[in-house]
Image (cartoon, helix red, strand yellow):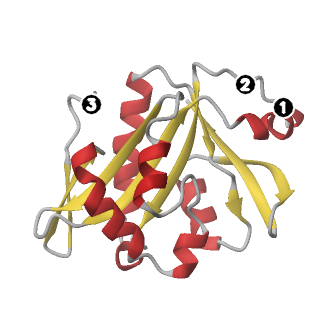
Amino acid sequence: MVSCWPFFYFVHMETIHFDWFKSGDLDALLDYLTHLSPATRKRFGPHAYDKASIEAFYTQPFEVWAYLAKSLKDDRIAAYAIVKRGFLEHDRPRLEAYGLSLNQYTDCTFAPSVADAWQGQGLGGQLFDFIQQDVRVRGMQRMILWGGVQASNVAALRFYEKMGFRVLGAFDYEGENWDMVKEW
């Protein structure tokens, strides 16, 4: 969908390629998810980390797009993100309580992850730029964080604010979390 966007990013002399997840990437994705630290795994939860769960997730009736940042050196995944058209239905009451008028056609829900070795190097921001351009072409006007962000995850909070997200409010789920949204 993105036509005039650079698909490559350079970090420490390594070239990273941005692309959409395809079924042929499943084994590489499983390897990526398996090597995330327990702390990173705890912060990413749209689907479980086994092959059957991932395959089931991508056969759901909702519209979802997945994105990868892969090293050209060894074809390993450095980052993975999911965008779902619409919003999570169980979040509706909480999001509407903030005053949002939800729209299943122009809202999307965003869940990113970056491999531990790549965190803090700018890769997440570059992948987000790629994703943002793609979802805007698809007609999205607002992005909501999938399950919010843990208040204790200060680096993620700073990242989302830098990317233009704003805090809507807090909720409790296994600790304090913040709902955040970005509109354009």
Does dot 2 land on a helix, a strand or a loop? loop
Q: CA distance from mark 1 to mark 2?
A: 7 Å
Q: Earlier in the sequence, mark 2 or mark 3?
A: 3
Q: CA distance from mark 2 to mark 3?
A: 26 Å
Which amino acid does the dot numbered 3 rest on?
Answer: Val
What is the x, y in percent for residue 140? 51, 25
Reading the image, the residue beneath label 3 is: 2
Q: The C terminus lies in which quarter of the figure?
A: top right
Q: 35 or 3: nearer the eye?
A: 35
What is the x, y in percent for residue 155? 58, 71
Check whether the beta carbons of the residues at disc 3 and disc 1 lie within 8 A of each other. Answer: no
Which amino acid does the dot numbered 1 rest on?
Answer: Glu
Within 10 Å of the Cα at label 2, are there few (<14), some (14-19), or many (20+) other Cα atoms?
some
Q: Residue furthest right?
A: 97
Does dot 3 land on a helix, a strand or a loop? loop
43 vs 5, left or right, is: right
70 vs 175, left or right, is: left
Q: Residue at x 40, y 58 (%)?
A: 51
Dividing the picture into quadrants, the one containing residue 2 is top left
Q: Residue at x 54, y 45 (%)?
A: 110
Q: 41 or 122: nearer the eye?
A: 41
Q: The N terminus lies in which quarter of the figure?
A: top left
Q: CA distance from mark 3 to mark 1?
A: 31 Å
